[in-house]
Structure formats: C-alpha cells, structure tokens
Amino acid sequence: MIKHAYRGIVLAASLGMASLPNAFAAPDAAQNARPTAAIMLAQTCAGCHGTEGYTRGDALVPLAGLPKVQFIHAMQNFADGSRESTVMGSIARNLTAKEIELMADYFASFPENPPIVKGNKS
Ligand code: HEC
C-alpha cells in the first residue's frame, strides 16, 4: 500500500517536471508528442511571440500554425541577412539547423492564432 502510494508520487512528480517548460498549456495528446527539446527551445521565443506562438493584439508576430517550410525559410533568411530584421538576425544565427527544424515542427503543430477582434483587449 505504502509502496503503491510512493510510486504515485514519483509518477506525479516526473509528470510535473515534464510539463514544467510548458506550464501554461493544458496537456493534450499532441503536446505529449512534442519533444521536450522543442518545447524548451520555443520557450526562448515566448517573450516576443507568445506562449506556444500565440500572441494577443497585433503588435507581435504569432508563430502558431506557421507552415514548417515558411518557418525554416524565414529563419534562414534572417540568419543570412537576406530578410531584414531588428532582432531575428542575431537569434537565427545562433541556432543550428536541427534546432530550427525542431521549432518548425513545434510551432506548425498548433492551430493558427485566432483572428484579432478589434477592440477586444482581453
Ligand atoms: C526580442 C523579441 C523576439 C524574440 C525573443 C524572438 N523573436 Fe522572432 N521576431 C521578432 C520580431 C520583432 C520579428 C519581426 C522581424 C524583426 O524585426 O526581427 C520576428 C519575426 C519572426 C519570424 C517571422 C514570422 C513571419 O510570419 O514571417 C519567425 C519565424 C520568428 N520570429 C521566429 C522566432 C523564434 C523561433 C524565436 C525563438 C528562438 C524568436 N523568433 C524569438 C521578435 C522576437
């Protein structure tokens, strides 16, 4: 009995740790399929692009639902300077092709940002 309860605690603790980098999202089947490395990388983008690539208002660029090819092209173009940027050039230059691909799959796995409703500030 005690042994059983202990196992439950360990399981709960390890599940909690697994979902730490993504604490704001409700767990779902798709999320479980997202590699932890991708989730952690994407967290570094969240300050500007929103958690899971969702933004509010129209000041920031949403990444949720961006097709994989488009994401990778954007990052390559930022890195080589063929697409002008304020901050993305230096960010993209410091990522490996593998890291970019992981994030491309990650952001593409979410539905697109819902359309902005004018006047809705919540
Ligand atoms: C400090 C804020 C900031 C951070 C952090 C940031 N971005 Fe950006 N991102 C921007 C801005 C601003 C743009 C618009 C281009 C520019 O001026 O650099 C942009 C544009 C983009 C675009 C182009 C989107 C489109 O629709 O064409 C992609 C892709 C992107 N960022 C990916 C990322 C990824 C991946 C990360 C994390 C590794 C990240 N960004 C982190 C600010 C940020």
Image (cartoon, rainbow, N blue to C red):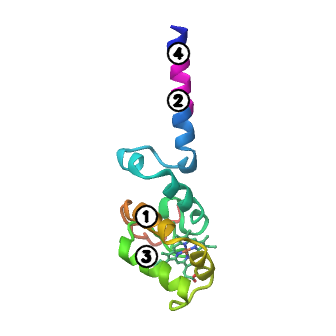
> Disc 2 marks which residue?
12
The amino acid sitting under disc 3 is: Ile
The amino acid sitting under disc 2 is: Ala
Residue 58: x and y in percent read 51, 75
- Dot 4 or dot 3: first in sequence order is 4
- Assess whether mark 1 and mark 4 are in contact (beta carbons under 8 angstroms): no
Specify whether residue 44 is painted magenta.
no
Q: CA distance from mark 1 to mark 2?
A: 27 Å
Question: Helix or strand or loop: what does disc 3 sit on?
Answer: helix
- Magenta stretch bounds: 5-13
- Assess whether mark 3 and mark 4 are in contact (beta carbons under 8 angstroms): no
The amino acid sitting under disc 1 is: Phe
Question: Helix or strand or loop: what does disc 1 sit on?
Answer: helix
- Dot 3 or dot 2: first in sequence order is 2
User: On the rendered structure, is 16 left or right of 107?
Assistant: right
Ligand 1 within 8 A of label 1's CB?
A: yes
Q: Residues within 10 Å of mark 3 (few under 14, many from 20)?
A: some
Residue extending furthest top? Answer: 1
> Disc 1 marks which residue?
107
| Tag in front: 3 or 2 | 3
| Tag in front: 3 or 1 | 3
Residue positioned 43% across, 74% down in the render: 71
User: Which of the two residues, 118 or 82, is positioned nearer the viewer here?
Assistant: 82
Q: CA distance from mark 3 to mark 2?
A: 36 Å
> Disc 3 marks which residue?
72
The amino acid sitting under disc 4 is: Ala
- Assess whether mark 2 and mark 1 are in contact (beta carbons under 8 angstroms): no
- Dot 3 or dot 1: first in sequence order is 3
